[in-house]
Amino acid sequence: MKKSLRKVFAGVMALLLLASCSNAPVDPAGEDAVSPGADTVPAEETEPVETEDSRLSVPDNLPEIKFDGREFRVLTTTSKEFQFRVDELNGEVTNDAVFNRNQTVEDRFDAKIVTVLTGSPYDQINQYVKAAADECEIVDHFEYKAYTPISQHSYLDWNTIPYIDQNQPWWNKDSNEGSVINGKLFCIVGDLSITAMQFTYAMFFDMDLTSQYGYSAEDMYATVFEGKWTLDRLQSIAESIYADLNANGKSDDGDTLGYAYWNLHGTDVWVTAIGEHITKYEDGQLVVTLGTEKVFNALDKVINLVFNTEGAYRFNDETHGRNEFISGRVAIMPMMFEDCYGPLRDMEYAYSVLPYPKYDEAQEEYYTNSMDQHSVFGVPVTLPTDRYDFVGVMMEALNAESWKTVYPAFYDTALKNKYSEDATTARMIDLIMDGRVYEFSFQFGEYLNALPYMFRNELYSGQNNLASTLQKSSKSLRKLLEKLYAMYE
């Protein structure tokens, strides 16, 4: 794509203020679908590490109230049930953290947390609403499926639910403020969504392999803390780590690689990582902001990294690509924290995590996002008004207790207790988590002609035709966004 067309279209898209806004995602799959580094941080970078005790001291400001054993029913799936209830204590840290959280909340408010299981909550709730059936207090489903109940007017506005204090640290303020359209918030994100943490993307690096090529863990961490961890830095490291182990004269499967990824995994993060947005809600209208020169340039850089760098490779199979990292043949690979709990637990080589690189050193912060299959929560419009207080108290308490006790337990389990023991590792995790940005357009991704996935698709093709793709889609997007905005009226 010629630069001139990109510049022209960047200007066009900046002016494309579309009278609508969204909260819905795309469907790439079905509903049921580390060791530490340095022990020290440069003195000027050292900060107090937040501990579980310091979290426990933060008040939730909820009233002392009893609900006489009332059931707090969560409509969810079997695969997501672990976020809301477990059967018993079993000695496993994360299981027991959820069990103890529930016990604390249930005893405090005299309530009972139960789950209502279904294959597709985003469809089931629409059926309940049409039948005027009172079957649950909240609904849990994929972020990218939010548009399904929202488009059917099945959800209440969270702003009508008392006791929800979105300024508290257990609510994702970025996500929730960015999802308000016409004053309404239909799907909310908080730390009750354990999957929002598990599905958070980071750059995992093999500490042994990078060290062999002259990049110690201390050096890698210092690059991040000094603000020099950029796309260009990733490029330079990737091209300097390579060995043609299969002696076929090309970088491919089985070689030692500086950077590799599965062809879909983590590619939706890049727009967020460089500090850009796919859409923004400004002055009562939705602005499509994907078509900027910075996005076009970043796409060029990532395409060059993947397709023109000797030490970089794209795997077509997710499991195989991850196994190459586990086998010690890939230095840097984007993965989710969820991988820590399964495939990486028995990894022989030492590994750790870094944030996604910045666009350049002028960018102030590191950003990432969570895969669009993490949980978001809605309140059925059929909920009786005399139960609004109940839902508000229980949701505020569950999210608060999750932030205070469940998240730290999951961090420590993922990182083999190094979150609490090692200040450098803890700070890196906190930096990544603090940089999470939730892009509203994923909630309507399927509905919006796959707008949030355009960067991914261009990268997959290896050709940067994003400006042309956006230009061809602009008319249909305008109409869809107008309809979307109407959903919030």
Image: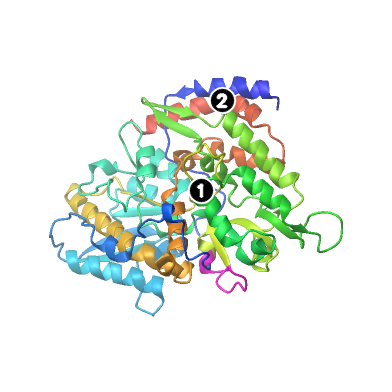
Label the magenta part by its dominant secondary structure: loop
- Name the residue beneath numbered marker 2: 474
Assign a secondary structure to mark 2: helix
The front one of 301 and 272 is 301
Q: Quadrant of the image for the N terminus?
A: top right
Task: Determine which of the numbered discs, if any, sits on residue 226 in the image.
Answer: 1
Query: Where does the image place residue 178, in percent across and percent down from the top left?
Result: 39, 38
- Give the Cα distance between marks 1 and 2: 40 Å
Assign a secondary structure to mark 1: loop
Occupied quadrant, residue 230: top right
Please name the residue shown 81% across and 64% down the image.
Answer: 245
Occupied quadrant, residue 205: bottom right
The front one of 266 and 328 is 328
Which amino acid lies under the numbered mark 2 shown in the image of this protein?
Ser
Task: Give the residue at the far right of this rendering.
Answer: 248
Please name the residue shown 55% across and 49% down the image.
Answer: 356
Neighbourhood count class around disc 1 (C-alpha, 10 Å): few under 14, some 14–19, many 20 upward: few
Query: Where does the image place residue 327, in percent across and percent down from the top left?
Result: 68, 69
Q: Is residue 110 visible?
A: no
> Bounds of the magenta span?
340-350
Compared to residue 66, the image places residue 387 above or below, namely above
Which amino acid lies under the numbered mark 1 shown in the image of this protein?
Glu
Q: Quadrant of the image for the C terminus?
A: top left
Neighbourhood count class around disc 2 (C-alpha, 10 Å): few under 14, some 14–19, many 20 upward: some
Q: Is residue 327 left or right of residue 369?
A: right
Q: Which of label 1 and label 2 is nearer to you?
A: 1
